[in-house]
Amino acid sequence: MLAHAIIFYFFSFVAIVSSIMVISTKNTVHAVFFLILDFVSVSCLFIMLGAEFLGMITLIVYVGAVAVLFLFVVMMINIDFAELKSGFLDYMPFGLLVGLVILIELGMMAVSWKYKPDFVVKNPITTTAASNTESIGLLIYTDYIFFFQLAGFILLVAMIGAIVLTFRRKDSLRRQDITKQVSREREDSVELIEVASSKGVRIND
Amino acid sequence: MISEYLNIIFFDSLKILALLVPVLIAVALIVWVDRRVWGLVQLRKGPNVVGPFGLLQTAADALKYIFKEIIIPAGSNKIIFILAPVVTMSLALLAWAVIPFGDNLYVTNINVGILYLFAVSSLGVYGIIMAGWASNSKYPFLGALRSAAQMVSYEVSIGLIIVTVLLCVGSLNLVDIVLAQKNIWFAIPLFPMFVIFFISALAETNRPPFDLPEAEAELVSGYQTEYSGMMYALFWLGEYANILLMCALGSILFLGGWLPLLDIAPFNLIPSPLWLIFKILLLFIVFALVKAIVPRYRYDQLMRLGWKVFLPLSLFWVVLTASFLFYFNLLPNQS
């Protein structure tokens, strides 16, 4: 148990320190790297809790894909810190409001306040299933299938929205059409013409 | 109690060493195999001077790199610059922990083994991005951007291919995946997926014809431009360790892992690790042949192949496999 505790405190310490570093470093790329470290240590914590599936999915989705895109964007944008800091006071009240709301929500969770006293979790995750992955699958695809599908549709709509917003069709752009290239035959492109001497050829195109 | 912990640490370290040392030797040999195959295709001899058949060529190269000076560019971000090759190499070695070489021959056997492999291989992109960004130079940066886009794109299709295999197995455990192929290797019923997996693995490990992050013709050598000495060697060996890992993943998912070709006398007498090594080597030789034969893709063709061909095709196969298994009541683990 001692080793377990040491490892737990190590990962939670790393997670907290790196999340503080995310908001306190000056360099945005460093901030993203600290965010990645945070994700990794959180996924280690998931694994320590026995939620191995969640831990691995956190690694794959957040570290392997989302953070790569963050890094991609942050590396390419040249961020001017003076300009960013100029509007600081204007946005501060709103930021404080958002922070306060999150703090209150966290507090509610911490003192385990229930908005409905007789609230019971319908089919909590039981340990009867063989593995963690199986129990999550059973729960999502039987009891909460509607919510799960709804979340999927919202993501789909967001994805289509993002594509529609950024897609600009340029007709002036010459695109490669591979089927057209491959299906081109000799007859379509080359023609051998016998040229009579001192007559020349008129090419009609 | 302390002695108990020390015991665990000691025996686990022994196990890890027993895995890592052969893997590192295999990486060195595989570099030699790659260069020999490359040479044979081009009617050259390849490295044949150092040691018998040139087998020690990689060791000689590594020794040369160790004695070279490590140059760190003045404008670079030093910590990340040094960390990048370390990340590449250690991630490539980390994944071997879950590869099973036999029924009971593995360092660890975790329930989500295949997800672990997928996660570690998707982290591999960080070594390259870190190198490209920390070098503070144009060509490495362009190489890193290319590689980030390329690896993220091809990971999507690899993920869907893994889902197809998992539908047939009903477990995320690597040992279960191999044992599910007792009757027939998945390469036969899922042949199109095997081909797509192979091509995606080429793209995922930045091998030719998809080696655009390096592309020495246009980007000098991409993210590795500013690296020298031992740090360059770490990138180089890490890349090969990754290729070896992808070959191992391919043989576990599609070629029946350590299972013999046929379960009859001459075949099942050969010990199981040898079968896995044989299959990995077979896949690697195809990797090497592709490098020698196929010309490099253009970048837009690479992206087109990933998103417009492989993604729809693998998604279609997931749906097809699922419907087939469901309709004929073949889904595993029905409770």
Image (tube, coloured by chain):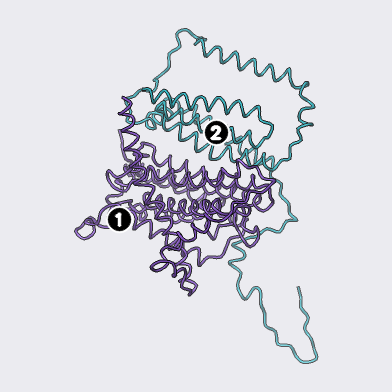
Instruction: Point out the image quarter for the C terminus of chain B.
Output: top left
Q: CA distance from mark 1 to mark 2?
A: 38 Å
**Disc 1 designates what residue?**
B274
In the image, residue B181 lies at what x, y percent?
A: 31, 49
Who is closer to the viewer here, B311 or A87?
Answer: A87
Q: Secondary structure at mark 1?
A: helix
In the image, residue B29 lies at what x, y percent?
A: 41, 59
Q: What residue do we see at 80% from left, 89% from top?
A: A199
Which chain is mark 1 on? B
Q: What number is the disc on residue B2?
A: none
- What is the residue that sits farthest to the left in this orientation? B265
Residue type indicated by callout 2: Leu
Count every numbered label the image shows and give the total: 2
Which chain is mark 2 on? A
Q: Secondary structure at mark 2?
A: helix
Q: Is residue B170 visible?
A: no
Q: Colour of chain B?
A: purple
Q: Colour of chain A?
A: cyan
Residue type indicated by callout 1: Leu
Who is closer to the viewer here, B176 or A20?
Answer: A20
Mark 2 crowdedness (10 Å alpha carbons): few <14, some 14-19, many ≥20: some
Q: What residue do we see at 39% from left, 40% from top?
A: B113
Q: What number is the disc on residue A37?
A: 2
In the image, residue A45 lies at what x, y percent?
A: 46, 27
Q: Is residue B294 visible?
A: yes
